[in-house]
Amino acid sequence: MQIHTAQPSGLLQYAIPIVIAAVVLTLRARRMTQVRPLKPEQLWIVPAVYLAIVVALFVMTPPNAIGWPICAAALLAGAAIGWQRGKTMHIEVHPETGTLNQKASMAGVMFLVVLFAIKFAAQTGTHAFHVNVAVLTDAFAALALGMFTMTRVEMYVRAKRLLEAARA
């Protein structure tokens, strides 16, 4: 007895992830553009967690000889992107309490949307361009690590500067 599993049609195969991503990004964009407290001493948490995830990924399935330089380049590209993304974050010192607040800019949100679109296009085109999916996954993990880390490093440096200026 043969069991047939229904595969979504070609259009649905791409439409479903795009719709889900659009909903998630819309909800995330709304939350990101709200003013929230910024605690510089906690900015290391997300990069540390993501570093642990990337290290675990690389330990379980290490990149091949071609993958390591690609991952290193992706990490550096992610760091440059992250620094620029960090600069788009609005940080201010509350005049009465002296506490820091942050708000992502729409430029930063659109930046993430463009990165997601590039990633989606690259993953869907892997068969057409004969791209190694494992190398692509490792490269995007390294890119994200660089981006998350340097976004928070830039925010930390700027937040400390703003606090010092406000106290002076």
Image: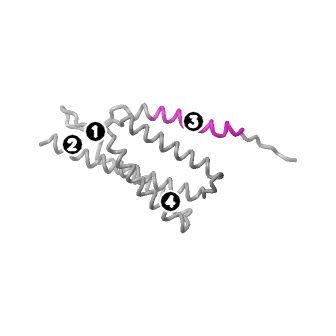
Disc 4 on helix, strand or loop?
helix
Q: Which residues are magenta?
A: 9-28
Disc 1 on helix, strand or loop?
strand
Q: Look at mark 4 in the image and give the residue it sits on.
A: 56
Sequence order check: which comes first, mark 2 or mark 3?
3
Label 4 with label 1: CB-CB less than 8 Å:
no
Label 1 with label 2: CB-CB less than 8 Å:
yes
**Real-space Cα distance between discs 1 and 2?**
8 Å
Label 4 with label 2: CB-CB less than 8 Å:
no
Dot 1, crowdedness within 10 Å: few (<14), some or many (≥20)? many
Q: Position of residue 2 (x, y in %)?
A: 85, 47
Dot 2, crowdedness within 10 Å: few (<14), some or many (≥20)? some
Query: Hey, which residue is sitting farthest bottom in the picture?
Result: 65
The residue located at (59%, 49%) in the rendering is 123
Q: Look at mark 1 in the image and give the residue it sits on.
A: 91
Q: Look at mark 2 in the image and give the residue it sits on.
A: 162
Above or below: residue 166 compared with residue 55: above
**Real-space Cα distance between discs 4 and 2?**
36 Å
Above or below: residue 48 compared with residue 113: below
Residue type indicated by callout 4: Ala
Residue type indicated by callout 2: Leu
Sequence order check: which comes first, mark 4 or mark 1?
4
Question: Is residue 134 left or right of 107 when viewed as pictured?
Answer: right
Q: Which SS does the magenta portion mostly show?
A: helix
